[in-house]
Amino acid sequence: MATIETFYDVMRRQGITRRSFMKYCSLTAAALGLGPAFVPKIAHAMETKPRTPVIWVHGLECTCCSESFIRSAHPLAKDVVLSMISLDYDDTLMAAAGHAAEAAFEETIQKYHGNYILAVEGNPPLNEDGMFCITGGKPFVEKLRHAAEGAKAIISWGACASYGCVQAAAPNPTRATPVHKVITDKPIIKVPGCPPIAEVMTGVITYMLTFDRMPELDRQGRPKMFYSQRIHDKCYRRPHFDAGQFVEHWDDENARKGYCLYKVGCKGPTTYNACSTVRWNEGTSFPIQSGHGCIGCSEDGFWDQGSFYDRLTTIKQFGIEANADQIGMGAAGVVGGAVAVHAAISALKRAQKKTQDKVEG
Amino acid sequence: MSDPHAPPPEVLAPDAPRLTGDATAADLESLRRRTSVYVYEAPVRLWHWLNAACITLLIVTGYLIGRPLPSMQIAEAYDQFVMGYIRFAHFAAAQVMTVMFFGRIYWAFMGNHHARQMFVLPIFSRRFWHELIFELRWYFFLESEPKKYIGHNPLAQLAMFFFMTLGLTFMLVTGWALYAEGAGQGSLPDLMFGWLIALVQNTQRLHTLHHLGMWAIVIFMIIHIYAAIREDIMSRQSMVSTMISGHRTFKDDRPD
Protein backbone atom coordinates (compact mmCIF):
# COMPACT_ATOMS: atom_id res chain seq x y z
CA MET A 1 0.00 0.00 0.00
CA ALA A 2 2.98 2.27 0.51
CA THR A 3 3.22 2.79 -3.23
CA ILE A 4 -0.12 4.56 -3.36
CA GLU A 5 0.20 8.32 -3.60
CA THR A 6 -1.32 10.64 -1.03
CA PHE A 7 -3.86 13.32 -1.98
CA TYR A 8 -1.16 15.91 -1.55
CA ASP A 9 1.15 14.07 -3.92
CA VAL A 10 -1.57 13.93 -6.53
CA MET A 11 -2.30 17.60 -6.11
CA ARG A 12 1.33 18.65 -6.34
CA ARG A 13 1.79 16.43 -9.34
CA GLN A 14 -1.04 18.35 -10.96
CA GLY A 15 0.81 21.60 -10.42
CA ILE A 16 -1.22 22.85 -7.50
CA THR A 17 0.61 25.14 -5.09
CA ARG A 18 0.66 24.55 -1.36
CA ARG A 19 -1.20 27.82 -0.90
CA SER A 20 -4.02 26.57 -3.13
CA PHE A 21 -3.97 23.27 -1.30
CA MET A 22 -4.53 25.01 2.04
CA LYS A 23 -7.38 27.02 0.52
CA TYR A 24 -8.92 23.77 -0.64
CA CYS A 25 -8.67 22.35 2.87
CA SER A 26 -10.41 25.42 4.31
CA LEU A 27 -13.17 25.24 1.73
CA THR A 28 -13.70 21.55 2.33
CA ALA A 29 -13.92 22.11 6.08
CA ALA A 30 -16.50 24.86 5.54
CA ALA A 31 -18.50 22.79 3.05
CA LEU A 32 -18.68 19.92 5.50
CA GLY A 33 -19.79 22.21 8.29
CA LEU A 34 -16.60 21.78 10.30
CA GLY A 35 -14.87 24.48 12.33
CA PRO A 36 -11.53 26.11 11.44
CA ALA A 37 -9.76 23.70 13.81
CA PHE A 38 -10.39 20.96 11.27
CA VAL A 39 -8.44 22.68 8.47
CA PRO A 40 -5.01 21.48 9.65
CA LYS A 41 -6.48 18.05 10.34
CA ILE A 42 -7.74 17.80 6.78
CA ALA A 43 -4.40 19.06 5.47
CA HIS A 44 -2.53 16.55 7.61
CA ALA A 45 -4.75 13.69 6.48
CA MET A 46 -4.33 14.59 2.86
CA GLU A 47 -0.57 14.93 3.17
CA THR A 48 0.01 11.65 4.91
CA LYS A 49 -2.75 9.20 4.12
CA PRO A 50 -2.65 7.09 1.00
CA ARG A 51 -5.69 7.97 -1.07
CA THR A 52 -8.64 5.64 -1.08
CA PRO A 53 -9.27 4.09 -4.45
CA VAL A 54 -12.70 4.58 -6.00
CA ILE A 55 -14.47 2.47 -8.58
CA TRP A 56 -17.32 4.23 -10.31
CA VAL A 57 -19.79 2.03 -12.18
CA HIS A 58 -22.76 2.94 -14.35
CA GLY A 59 -26.04 1.01 -14.53
CA LEU A 60 -29.37 2.19 -15.91
CA GLU A 61 -28.82 5.92 -15.83
CA CYS A 62 -28.51 9.05 -17.95
CA THR A 63 -25.02 10.15 -16.80
CA CYS A 64 -26.47 13.35 -15.34
CA CYS A 65 -24.72 12.53 -12.05
CA SER A 66 -21.35 12.46 -13.83
CA GLU A 67 -22.27 15.60 -15.73
CA SER A 68 -23.09 17.31 -12.47
CA PHE A 69 -19.98 15.99 -10.75
CA ILE A 70 -17.53 17.35 -13.33
CA ARG A 71 -19.12 20.80 -12.91
CA SER A 72 -18.22 21.09 -9.25
CA ALA A 73 -17.84 24.74 -8.30
CA HIS A 74 -14.42 24.42 -6.86
CA PRO A 75 -12.17 23.33 -9.72
CA LEU A 76 -9.54 22.05 -7.37
CA ALA A 77 -11.94 19.66 -5.64
CA LYS A 78 -13.12 18.41 -8.98
CA ASP A 79 -9.62 17.97 -10.43
CA VAL A 80 -8.26 16.20 -7.43
CA VAL A 81 -11.15 13.91 -6.78
CA LEU A 82 -11.79 13.27 -10.43
CA SER A 83 -8.17 12.51 -11.30
CA MET A 84 -7.98 10.14 -8.39
CA ILE A 85 -11.09 8.35 -9.51
CA SER A 86 -10.05 8.14 -13.14
CA LEU A 87 -6.82 6.56 -12.00
CA ASP A 88 -8.87 3.58 -10.99
CA TYR A 89 -12.08 2.99 -12.87
CA ASP A 90 -14.92 4.99 -14.33
CA ASP A 91 -15.99 3.70 -17.71
CA THR A 92 -17.44 7.05 -18.73
CA LEU A 93 -14.60 9.32 -17.69
CA MET A 94 -11.49 7.14 -17.92
CA ALA A 95 -9.21 7.26 -20.94
CA ALA A 96 -9.09 3.50 -21.40
CA ALA A 97 -11.88 1.67 -23.20
CA GLY A 98 -13.02 -1.85 -24.02
CA HIS A 99 -10.90 -4.72 -22.73
CA ALA A 100 -8.31 -2.37 -21.27
CA ALA A 101 -10.99 -0.68 -19.17
CA GLU A 102 -12.39 -3.97 -17.94
CA ALA A 103 -8.88 -5.16 -17.13
CA ALA A 104 -8.36 -2.01 -15.04
CA PHE A 105 -11.66 -2.75 -13.30
CA GLU A 106 -10.56 -6.26 -12.33
CA GLU A 107 -7.13 -5.08 -11.35
CA THR A 108 -8.52 -2.41 -9.03
CA ILE A 109 -10.89 -4.86 -7.39
CA GLN A 110 -8.13 -7.38 -6.75
CA LYS A 111 -5.43 -4.92 -5.77
CA TYR A 112 -7.51 -2.94 -3.30
CA HIS A 113 -9.89 -5.70 -2.21
CA GLY A 114 -11.77 -4.57 0.89
CA ASN A 115 -10.37 -1.07 0.67
CA TYR A 116 -11.99 0.72 -2.22
CA ILE A 117 -15.17 2.76 -2.33
CA LEU A 118 -17.72 1.68 -4.90
CA ALA A 119 -19.63 4.59 -6.41
CA VAL A 120 -22.75 3.47 -8.26
CA GLU A 121 -24.48 5.68 -10.77
CA GLY A 122 -27.79 4.26 -11.96
CA ASN A 123 -29.32 1.01 -10.86
CA PRO A 124 -29.53 -2.62 -11.98
CA PRO A 125 -32.68 -3.91 -13.70
CA LEU A 126 -33.49 -7.38 -12.37
CA ASN A 127 -36.09 -8.64 -14.86
CA GLU A 128 -34.96 -11.13 -17.52
CA ASP A 129 -31.85 -11.89 -15.47
CA GLY A 130 -30.73 -8.28 -15.78
CA MET A 131 -30.66 -8.31 -19.60
CA PHE A 132 -31.98 -4.76 -19.80
CA CYS A 133 -28.60 -3.32 -18.90
CA ILE A 134 -25.46 -4.93 -20.30
CA THR A 135 -22.04 -3.43 -19.64
CA GLY A 136 -18.81 -5.11 -20.72
CA GLY A 137 -20.83 -8.01 -22.15
CA LYS A 138 -22.45 -8.91 -18.82
CA PRO A 139 -25.64 -7.89 -17.06
CA PHE A 140 -24.92 -4.85 -14.91
CA VAL A 141 -26.34 -6.54 -11.83
CA GLU A 142 -23.52 -9.12 -11.97
CA LYS A 143 -20.91 -6.43 -12.34
CA LEU A 144 -22.43 -4.57 -9.40
CA ARG A 145 -22.44 -7.65 -7.18
CA HIS A 146 -18.88 -8.42 -8.20
CA ALA A 147 -17.63 -4.91 -7.48
CA ALA A 148 -19.64 -4.63 -4.25
CA GLU A 149 -18.18 -7.84 -2.85
CA GLY A 150 -14.79 -6.25 -2.14
CA ALA A 151 -15.95 -2.72 -1.47
CA LYS A 152 -15.43 -0.98 1.84
CA ALA A 153 -18.51 1.15 1.33
CA ILE A 154 -20.91 2.03 -1.45
CA ILE A 155 -22.07 5.44 -2.58
CA SER A 156 -25.42 5.45 -4.38
CA TRP A 157 -25.22 8.44 -6.69
CA GLY A 158 -28.45 10.13 -7.59
CA ALA A 159 -32.12 9.19 -7.48
CA CYS A 160 -31.49 6.12 -9.72
CA ALA A 161 -29.11 4.34 -7.40
CA SER A 162 -30.82 5.61 -4.24
CA TYR A 163 -34.49 5.11 -5.07
CA GLY A 164 -34.86 3.91 -8.67
CA CYS A 165 -35.89 7.18 -10.34
CA VAL A 166 -37.68 7.20 -13.71
CA GLN A 167 -36.68 3.71 -14.83
CA ALA A 168 -38.25 2.31 -11.66
CA ALA A 169 -41.44 4.38 -12.06
CA ALA A 170 -44.65 2.36 -12.24
CA PRO A 171 -45.07 -0.10 -13.91
CA ASN A 172 -41.28 -0.52 -13.90
CA PRO A 173 -41.06 -3.01 -16.80
CA THR A 174 -37.36 -3.78 -16.33
CA ARG A 175 -37.71 -4.06 -12.53
CA ALA A 176 -35.05 -1.43 -12.04
CA THR A 177 -34.06 -1.75 -8.39
CA PRO A 178 -32.15 0.67 -6.17
CA VAL A 179 -28.71 -0.46 -5.05
CA HIS A 180 -29.56 -0.98 -1.38
CA LYS A 181 -32.18 -3.57 -2.32
CA VAL A 182 -29.61 -5.60 -4.29
CA ILE A 183 -26.56 -5.18 -2.08
CA THR A 184 -27.62 -5.69 1.50
CA ASP A 185 -24.36 -6.51 3.29
CA LYS A 186 -22.39 -3.26 2.76
CA PRO A 187 -22.72 0.18 4.24
CA ILE A 188 -24.49 2.31 1.64
CA ILE A 189 -24.62 6.06 1.54
CA LYS A 190 -27.39 7.54 -0.58
CA VAL A 191 -26.81 10.82 -2.37
CA PRO A 192 -30.18 11.33 -4.06
CA GLY A 193 -31.10 13.99 -6.58
CA CYS A 194 -31.57 14.03 -10.29
CA PRO A 195 -28.69 14.78 -10.44
CA PRO A 196 -27.24 15.46 -6.99
CA ILE A 197 -25.58 18.84 -6.56
CA ALA A 198 -21.94 18.76 -7.68
CA GLU A 199 -20.64 20.19 -4.40
CA VAL A 200 -22.68 17.67 -2.45
CA MET A 201 -21.07 14.86 -4.44
CA THR A 202 -17.50 16.13 -4.06
CA GLY A 203 -18.24 16.99 -0.43
CA VAL A 204 -19.37 13.45 0.36
CA ILE A 205 -16.46 11.82 -1.44
CA THR A 206 -13.91 14.20 0.07
CA TYR A 207 -15.29 13.53 3.53
CA MET A 208 -14.97 9.80 3.06
CA LEU A 209 -11.47 10.01 1.58
CA THR A 210 -10.27 12.44 4.22
CA PHE A 211 -11.73 10.99 7.36
CA ASP A 212 -11.77 7.40 6.22
CA ARG A 213 -15.33 6.89 7.40
CA MET A 214 -18.87 7.51 6.29
CA PRO A 215 -20.46 10.85 7.04
CA GLU A 216 -23.31 10.75 9.57
CA LEU A 217 -26.42 9.42 7.86
CA ASP A 218 -30.11 10.03 8.50
CA ARG A 219 -32.80 7.35 8.72
CA GLN A 220 -32.96 7.00 4.95
CA GLY A 221 -29.19 6.65 4.64
CA ARG A 222 -28.48 10.15 3.32
CA PRO A 223 -25.62 12.28 4.64
CA LYS A 224 -27.11 14.55 7.29
CA MET A 225 -24.94 17.50 6.40
CA PHE A 226 -26.69 17.93 3.05
CA TYR A 227 -30.06 16.21 3.42
CA SER A 228 -31.24 16.96 6.96
CA GLN A 229 -33.40 19.90 5.97
CA ARG A 230 -36.03 20.57 3.35
CA ILE A 231 -35.60 22.98 0.47
CA HIS A 232 -38.45 24.90 2.14
CA ASP A 233 -36.59 25.27 5.46
CA LYS A 234 -33.76 27.29 3.95
CA CYS A 235 -35.52 28.79 0.94
CA TYR A 236 -34.85 32.48 0.41
CA ARG A 237 -38.54 32.90 -0.53
CA ARG A 238 -39.66 31.46 2.82
CA PRO A 239 -40.57 34.89 4.28
CA HIS A 240 -43.17 35.22 1.51
CA PHE A 241 -44.59 31.82 2.52
CA ASP A 242 -44.89 32.89 6.14
CA ALA A 243 -46.39 36.20 5.07
CA GLY A 244 -48.96 34.45 2.90
CA GLN A 245 -47.70 35.98 -0.33
CA PHE A 246 -47.90 33.50 -3.18
CA VAL A 247 -47.52 33.27 -6.92
CA GLU A 248 -51.13 32.57 -7.94
CA HIS A 249 -50.50 31.89 -11.63
CA TRP A 250 -47.39 31.52 -13.71
CA ASP A 251 -46.03 34.85 -14.81
CA ASP A 252 -48.45 36.95 -12.75
CA GLU A 253 -47.41 40.09 -10.88
CA ASN A 254 -46.52 38.05 -7.79
CA ALA A 255 -44.24 35.82 -9.84
CA ARG A 256 -42.39 38.91 -11.00
CA LYS A 257 -42.09 40.03 -7.39
CA GLY A 258 -40.53 36.71 -6.48
CA TYR A 259 -43.23 35.47 -4.10
CA CYS A 260 -43.47 31.91 -2.78
CA LEU A 261 -44.22 29.20 -5.38
CA TYR A 262 -46.21 27.00 -2.95
CA LYS A 263 -49.54 27.51 -4.72
CA VAL A 264 -48.14 26.60 -8.13
CA GLY A 265 -46.99 23.28 -6.78
CA CYS A 266 -43.50 23.83 -5.41
CA LYS A 267 -42.40 20.64 -3.65
CA GLY A 268 -39.83 22.40 -1.51
CA PRO A 269 -41.83 21.62 1.67
CA THR A 270 -41.64 17.88 0.97
CA THR A 271 -38.10 17.62 -0.41
CA TYR A 272 -34.86 17.08 1.45
CA ASN A 273 -31.86 18.51 -0.36
CA ALA A 274 -29.30 21.30 -0.18
CA CYS A 275 -30.38 23.25 -3.29
CA SER A 276 -31.54 26.32 -1.37
CA THR A 277 -28.19 26.62 0.43
CA VAL A 278 -25.50 25.21 -1.86
CA ARG A 279 -27.33 26.04 -5.12
CA TRP A 280 -26.18 25.00 -8.56
CA ASN A 281 -23.54 25.90 -11.13
CA GLU A 282 -21.02 27.49 -8.82
CA GLY A 283 -23.74 28.83 -6.55
CA THR A 284 -25.42 30.72 -9.37
CA SER A 285 -29.03 29.69 -8.87
CA PHE A 286 -31.47 26.87 -8.19
CA PRO A 287 -34.94 26.08 -9.57
CA ILE A 288 -36.91 28.26 -7.15
CA GLN A 289 -34.55 31.18 -7.68
CA SER A 290 -35.19 30.97 -11.42
CA GLY A 291 -38.95 31.10 -10.80
CA HIS A 292 -39.98 27.45 -11.00
CA GLY A 293 -41.06 25.30 -8.09
CA CYS A 294 -39.04 22.36 -6.82
CA ILE A 295 -40.10 19.05 -8.40
CA GLY A 296 -38.79 16.96 -5.52
CA CYS A 297 -36.20 15.01 -7.54
CA SER A 298 -34.30 13.83 -4.48
CA GLU A 299 -37.34 12.16 -2.89
CA ASP A 300 -38.18 8.47 -2.98
CA GLY A 301 -40.58 7.65 -5.81
CA PHE A 302 -40.74 11.20 -7.15
CA TRP A 303 -41.95 10.03 -10.57
CA ASP A 304 -44.93 8.21 -9.10
CA GLN A 305 -46.56 11.05 -7.15
CA GLY A 306 -48.56 12.51 -10.06
CA SER A 307 -47.90 15.93 -11.57
CA PHE A 308 -44.78 17.92 -10.78
CA TYR A 309 -47.15 20.80 -10.01
CA ASP A 310 -49.33 19.06 -7.41
CA ARG A 311 -48.50 19.17 -3.74
CA LEU A 312 -50.59 16.09 -3.00
CA THR A 313 -49.97 12.63 -4.36
CA THR A 314 -52.31 11.50 -7.12
CA ILE A 315 -54.54 8.65 -5.95
CA LYS A 316 -55.17 6.37 -8.91
CA GLN A 317 -57.40 3.85 -7.15
CA PHE A 318 -60.44 6.00 -7.85
CA GLY A 319 -60.20 5.45 -11.59
CA ILE A 320 -59.77 9.05 -12.51
CA GLU A 321 -56.76 10.95 -11.33
CA ALA A 322 -57.70 12.65 -8.13
CA ASN A 323 -55.95 13.95 -5.08
CA ALA A 324 -56.75 13.60 -1.41
CA ASP A 325 -58.69 16.87 -1.24
CA GLN A 326 -60.87 16.12 -4.26
CA ILE A 327 -61.69 12.66 -2.94
CA GLY A 328 -62.25 13.94 0.59
CA MET A 329 -64.45 16.81 -0.52
CA GLY A 330 -66.42 14.48 -2.79
CA ALA A 331 -66.94 11.96 0.01
CA ALA A 332 -67.95 14.73 2.44
CA GLY A 333 -70.41 16.04 -0.17
CA VAL A 334 -71.94 12.61 -0.66
CA VAL A 335 -72.23 12.07 3.09
CA GLY A 336 -73.68 15.56 3.56
CA GLY A 337 -76.27 14.86 0.84
CA ALA A 338 -77.10 11.49 2.33
CA VAL A 339 -77.55 13.12 5.74
CA ALA A 340 -79.91 15.72 4.27
CA VAL A 341 -82.00 13.02 2.57
CA HIS A 342 -81.98 10.93 5.73
CA ALA A 343 -83.09 13.93 7.76
CA ALA A 344 -85.96 14.60 5.34
CA ILE A 345 -87.13 10.99 5.51
CA SER A 346 -86.82 11.05 9.31
CA ALA A 347 -88.98 14.16 9.49
CA LEU A 348 -91.59 12.59 7.23
CA LYS A 349 -91.60 9.36 9.24
CA ARG A 350 -91.98 11.30 12.43
CA ALA A 351 -94.85 13.35 11.06
CA GLN A 352 -96.46 10.13 9.86
CA LYS A 353 -96.07 8.50 13.27
CA LYS A 354 -97.55 11.53 15.04
CA THR A 355 -100.59 11.48 12.81
CA GLN A 356 -100.92 7.76 13.40
CA ASP A 357 -100.60 8.18 17.16
CA LYS A 358 -103.30 10.83 17.09
CA VAL A 359 -105.62 8.57 15.12
CA GLU A 360 -104.94 5.62 17.42
CA GLY A 361 -104.98 7.67 20.61
CA MET B 1 -114.50 37.45 28.55
CA SER B 2 -111.91 35.94 30.84
CA ASP B 3 -108.53 37.41 31.66
CA PRO B 4 -106.18 36.62 28.78
CA HIS B 5 -103.21 36.41 31.17
CA ALA B 6 -104.81 33.85 33.46
CA PRO B 7 -103.31 30.34 33.35
CA PRO B 8 -105.30 27.77 31.39
CA PRO B 9 -107.67 25.65 33.48
CA GLU B 10 -105.55 22.46 33.32
CA VAL B 11 -102.64 24.22 35.06
CA LEU B 12 -102.48 23.16 38.63
CA ALA B 13 -102.79 25.46 41.55
CA PRO B 14 -99.56 26.21 43.44
CA ASP B 15 -100.22 23.14 45.60
CA ALA B 16 -97.67 21.20 43.54
CA PRO B 17 -94.71 22.52 45.48
CA ARG B 18 -91.89 20.96 43.42
CA LEU B 19 -93.04 22.44 40.13
CA THR B 20 -92.96 25.77 38.43
CA GLY B 21 -96.15 27.56 37.64
CA ASP B 22 -96.88 26.33 34.15
CA ALA B 23 -96.66 22.58 34.82
CA THR B 24 -99.69 20.76 33.53
CA ALA B 25 -101.17 17.50 34.74
CA ALA B 26 -99.77 15.82 31.63
CA ASP B 27 -96.34 17.20 32.52
CA LEU B 28 -96.61 15.71 35.97
CA GLU B 29 -97.60 12.35 34.58
CA SER B 30 -94.72 12.49 32.10
CA LEU B 31 -92.29 13.51 34.79
CA ARG B 32 -93.26 10.56 36.89
CA ARG B 33 -92.05 8.23 34.11
CA ARG B 34 -88.79 10.00 33.27
CA THR B 35 -85.50 8.88 34.70
CA SER B 36 -81.97 10.15 34.47
CA VAL B 37 -78.53 8.58 34.68
CA TYR B 38 -75.29 10.45 35.20
CA VAL B 39 -73.23 9.22 32.24
CA TYR B 40 -70.59 11.72 31.17
CA GLU B 41 -68.46 13.05 33.99
CA ALA B 42 -67.09 16.58 33.86
CA PRO B 43 -63.65 15.66 32.40
CA VAL B 44 -65.34 13.75 29.57
CA ARG B 45 -67.64 16.65 28.76
CA LEU B 46 -64.84 19.16 28.98
CA TRP B 47 -62.71 16.99 26.70
CA HIS B 48 -65.56 16.63 24.24
CA TRP B 49 -66.12 20.34 23.79
CA LEU B 50 -62.48 21.43 23.85
CA ASN B 51 -61.63 18.60 21.49
CA ALA B 52 -64.45 19.69 19.18
CA ALA B 53 -63.13 23.26 19.26
CA CYS B 54 -59.59 22.06 18.52
CA ILE B 55 -60.73 19.85 15.67
CA THR B 56 -62.74 22.67 14.13
CA LEU B 57 -59.77 25.01 14.37
CA LEU B 58 -57.45 22.31 13.02
CA ILE B 59 -59.70 21.59 10.04
CA VAL B 60 -60.05 25.25 9.11
CA THR B 61 -56.37 26.11 9.58
CA GLY B 62 -55.24 22.81 8.07
CA TYR B 63 -57.29 23.44 4.96
CA LEU B 64 -55.84 26.94 4.72
CA ILE B 65 -52.32 25.54 5.04
CA GLY B 66 -52.98 23.13 2.18
CA ARG B 67 -54.81 25.75 0.11
CA PRO B 68 -53.73 29.14 1.36
CA LEU B 69 -55.85 32.28 1.25
CA PRO B 70 -55.40 34.58 -1.74
CA SER B 71 -52.10 36.44 -1.53
CA MET B 72 -52.37 39.62 0.43
CA GLN B 73 -50.14 42.64 0.47
CA ILE B 74 -50.60 44.11 3.94
CA ALA B 75 -46.98 45.01 4.49
CA GLU B 76 -43.52 43.95 3.48
CA ALA B 77 -42.99 40.22 3.89
CA TYR B 78 -41.01 40.70 7.11
CA ASP B 79 -43.93 42.60 8.70
CA GLN B 80 -46.65 40.26 7.50
CA PHE B 81 -47.24 36.85 9.06
CA VAL B 82 -50.62 35.61 7.75
CA MET B 83 -49.53 32.08 6.88
CA GLY B 84 -47.32 32.06 9.95
CA TYR B 85 -50.25 32.77 12.30
CA ILE B 86 -52.44 30.18 10.56
CA ARG B 87 -49.73 27.57 10.96
CA PHE B 88 -49.14 28.64 14.56
CA ALA B 89 -52.83 28.18 15.32
CA HIS B 90 -52.74 24.75 13.71
CA PHE B 91 -49.70 23.63 15.68
CA ALA B 92 -50.95 25.12 18.94
CA ALA B 93 -54.37 23.49 18.63
CA ALA B 94 -52.72 20.18 17.74
CA GLN B 95 -50.49 20.36 20.79
CA VAL B 96 -53.45 21.14 23.04
CA MET B 97 -55.37 18.28 21.44
CA THR B 98 -52.44 15.91 22.00
CA VAL B 99 -52.26 16.73 25.70
CA MET B 100 -56.03 16.41 26.04
CA PHE B 101 -56.01 13.07 24.22
CA PHE B 102 -53.60 11.71 26.80
CA GLY B 103 -55.80 13.23 29.49
CA ARG B 104 -58.81 11.47 27.98
CA ILE B 105 -56.96 8.15 28.00
CA TYR B 106 -56.05 8.76 31.63
CA TRP B 107 -59.70 9.40 32.40
CA ALA B 108 -60.68 6.15 30.71
CA PHE B 109 -58.86 4.46 33.57
CA MET B 110 -59.91 6.84 36.33
CA GLY B 111 -63.44 7.70 35.29
CA ASN B 112 -66.67 5.73 35.33
CA HIS B 113 -67.61 2.79 33.14
CA HIS B 114 -68.87 4.98 30.30
CA ALA B 115 -65.55 6.84 30.02
CA ARG B 116 -64.03 3.62 28.65
CA GLN B 117 -66.61 2.92 25.99
CA MET B 118 -64.87 4.93 23.27
CA PHE B 119 -61.66 2.94 23.53
CA VAL B 120 -63.00 -0.59 23.25
CA LEU B 121 -65.07 -2.58 20.80
CA PRO B 122 -66.85 -5.56 22.39
CA ILE B 123 -66.59 -7.59 19.18
CA PHE B 124 -66.97 -10.91 21.01
CA SER B 125 -70.26 -9.90 22.54
CA ARG B 126 -73.27 -11.33 20.69
CA ARG B 127 -75.42 -8.66 22.22
CA PHE B 128 -73.24 -5.93 20.71
CA TRP B 129 -73.70 -7.29 17.18
CA HIS B 130 -77.38 -7.89 17.73
CA GLU B 131 -77.91 -4.31 18.89
CA LEU B 132 -75.69 -3.02 16.10
CA ILE B 133 -77.93 -4.64 13.52
CA PHE B 134 -80.98 -3.31 15.32
CA GLU B 135 -79.52 0.21 15.29
CA LEU B 136 -78.71 -0.08 11.59
CA ARG B 137 -82.30 -1.14 10.96
CA TRP B 138 -83.47 1.91 12.92
CA TYR B 139 -81.39 4.14 10.65
CA PHE B 140 -82.76 2.42 7.58
CA PHE B 141 -86.31 3.14 8.88
CA LEU B 142 -86.96 -0.57 9.36
CA GLU B 143 -87.65 -0.27 13.09
CA SER B 144 -90.44 1.94 14.34
CA GLU B 145 -88.78 2.71 17.63
CA PRO B 146 -85.17 2.74 18.82
CA LYS B 147 -83.82 1.12 21.94
CA LYS B 148 -82.70 3.08 24.96
CA TYR B 149 -78.98 3.36 25.59
CA ILE B 150 -77.16 4.73 28.61
CA GLY B 151 -73.86 5.31 26.79
CA HIS B 152 -73.22 5.11 23.06
CA ASN B 153 -75.39 2.89 20.91
CA PRO B 154 -73.32 0.18 19.16
CA LEU B 155 -73.25 2.08 15.88
CA ALA B 156 -72.04 5.21 17.64
CA GLN B 157 -69.49 3.18 19.57
CA LEU B 158 -68.16 1.78 16.30
CA ALA B 159 -67.90 5.26 14.79
CA MET B 160 -66.27 6.67 17.93
CA PHE B 161 -63.72 3.89 18.00
CA PHE B 162 -62.71 4.18 14.34
CA PHE B 163 -62.95 7.92 13.81
CA MET B 164 -61.92 9.24 17.22
CA THR B 165 -59.78 6.63 18.97
CA LEU B 166 -58.05 5.41 15.81
CA GLY B 167 -58.71 8.46 13.62
CA LEU B 168 -57.38 11.01 16.10
CA THR B 169 -54.39 8.79 16.83
CA PHE B 170 -53.67 8.63 13.10
CA MET B 171 -53.96 12.40 12.74
CA LEU B 172 -51.80 13.02 15.81
CA VAL B 173 -49.07 10.64 14.66
CA THR B 174 -48.99 11.85 11.04
CA GLY B 175 -49.30 15.45 12.19
CA TRP B 176 -46.41 15.16 14.61
CA ALA B 177 -44.31 13.45 11.93
CA LEU B 178 -44.97 16.43 9.65
CA TYR B 179 -44.19 18.81 12.49
CA ALA B 180 -40.93 16.92 13.04
CA GLU B 181 -39.79 18.05 9.60
CA GLY B 182 -39.83 21.66 10.68
CA ALA B 183 -38.61 20.92 14.19
CA GLY B 184 -35.53 19.36 12.64
CA GLN B 185 -33.61 16.12 12.85
CA GLY B 186 -32.75 15.12 16.39
CA SER B 187 -35.68 17.08 17.87
CA LEU B 188 -38.12 15.29 20.16
CA PRO B 189 -40.92 15.07 17.54
CA ASP B 190 -38.36 13.75 15.06
CA LEU B 191 -37.07 11.12 17.44
CA MET B 192 -40.62 9.98 18.19
CA PHE B 193 -42.32 10.19 14.81
CA GLY B 194 -39.65 10.91 12.18
CA TRP B 195 -39.49 7.23 11.24
CA LEU B 196 -42.92 7.54 9.69
CA ILE B 197 -41.59 9.51 6.70
CA ALA B 198 -39.43 6.67 5.38
CA LEU B 199 -42.24 4.23 6.17
CA VAL B 200 -44.67 5.96 3.82
CA GLN B 201 -41.88 6.59 1.25
CA ASN B 202 -41.79 10.39 1.19
CA THR B 203 -43.32 13.33 2.96
CA GLN B 204 -45.60 14.25 0.09
CA ARG B 205 -47.40 10.96 0.68
CA LEU B 206 -47.48 11.73 4.39
CA HIS B 207 -49.14 15.08 3.60
CA THR B 208 -51.62 13.24 1.38
CA LEU B 209 -52.49 10.78 4.15
CA HIS B 210 -52.91 13.65 6.62
CA HIS B 211 -55.33 15.34 4.19
CA LEU B 212 -57.34 12.12 3.76
CA GLY B 213 -57.48 11.78 7.54
CA MET B 214 -58.89 15.30 7.79
CA TRP B 215 -61.67 14.47 5.36
CA ALA B 216 -62.48 11.33 7.32
CA ILE B 217 -62.91 13.50 10.41
CA VAL B 218 -65.04 16.01 8.48
CA ILE B 219 -67.31 13.13 7.41
CA PHE B 220 -67.45 11.92 11.02
CA MET B 221 -68.41 15.40 12.18
CA ILE B 222 -71.28 15.63 9.69
CA ILE B 223 -72.66 12.25 10.74
CA HIS B 224 -72.01 12.82 14.45
CA ILE B 225 -73.78 16.17 14.63
CA TYR B 226 -76.67 14.98 12.50
CA ALA B 227 -77.11 11.79 14.50
CA ALA B 228 -76.91 13.63 17.82
CA ILE B 229 -79.60 16.13 16.84
CA ARG B 230 -81.78 13.53 15.13
CA GLU B 231 -81.64 11.18 18.11
CA ASP B 232 -82.24 14.06 20.48
CA ILE B 233 -85.55 14.59 18.68
CA MET B 234 -86.48 11.06 17.62
CA SER B 235 -84.98 8.69 20.14
CA ARG B 236 -86.29 7.88 23.60
CA GLN B 237 -83.48 9.67 25.40
CA SER B 238 -81.59 12.94 25.62
CA MET B 239 -78.51 13.41 23.44
CA VAL B 240 -77.20 16.96 23.10
CA SER B 241 -77.91 18.06 26.67
CA THR B 242 -76.25 14.89 27.99
CA MET B 243 -72.93 16.20 26.72
CA ILE B 244 -73.62 19.47 28.50
CA SER B 245 -75.02 18.33 31.88
CA GLY B 246 -73.72 14.77 31.87
CA HIS B 247 -77.21 13.38 32.61
CA ARG B 248 -78.97 11.02 30.26
CA THR B 249 -82.70 11.46 30.63
CA PHE B 250 -85.27 9.11 29.19
CA LYS B 251 -88.61 9.97 27.71
CA ASP B 252 -90.45 6.83 28.87
CA ASP B 253 -90.17 4.18 31.56
CA ARG B 254 -90.73 1.13 29.41
CA PRO B 255 -88.05 -1.46 30.23
CA ASP B 256 -87.07 -2.34 26.66
Image (cartoon, coloured by chain):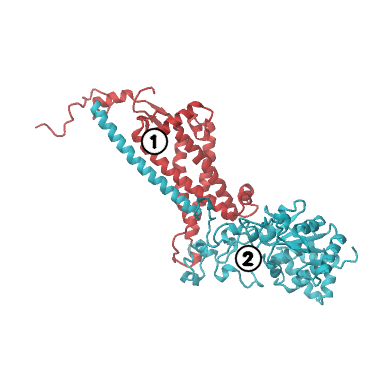
Residue B20 placement: quadrant: top left
Which element type, helix, strand or loop, lies under badge 1? loop
Chain whose colour in the figure is red: B
> Mark 2 is on which residue type?
Cys
Q: How many marks?
A: 2
Which quadrant of the figure contains the N terminus of chain A? bottom right
The residue located at (29%, 32%) in the rendering is A353
Q: Is residue B138 above or below residue A241?
A: above
Q: Residues within 10 Å of mark 1 (few under 14, many from 20)?
A: few
> Mark 1 is on which residue type?
Phe
Which element type, helix, strand or loop, lies under badge 2? helix
In the picture as drawn, the residue positioned furthest to the left comes out as B1
The disc at residue A275 is 2
The disc at residue B195 is none
Residue A79 percent across, percent down from the top left: 77, 72
Res A41 seen here: yes
The residue to which callout 1 is attached is B140
Q: Colour of chain A?
A: cyan
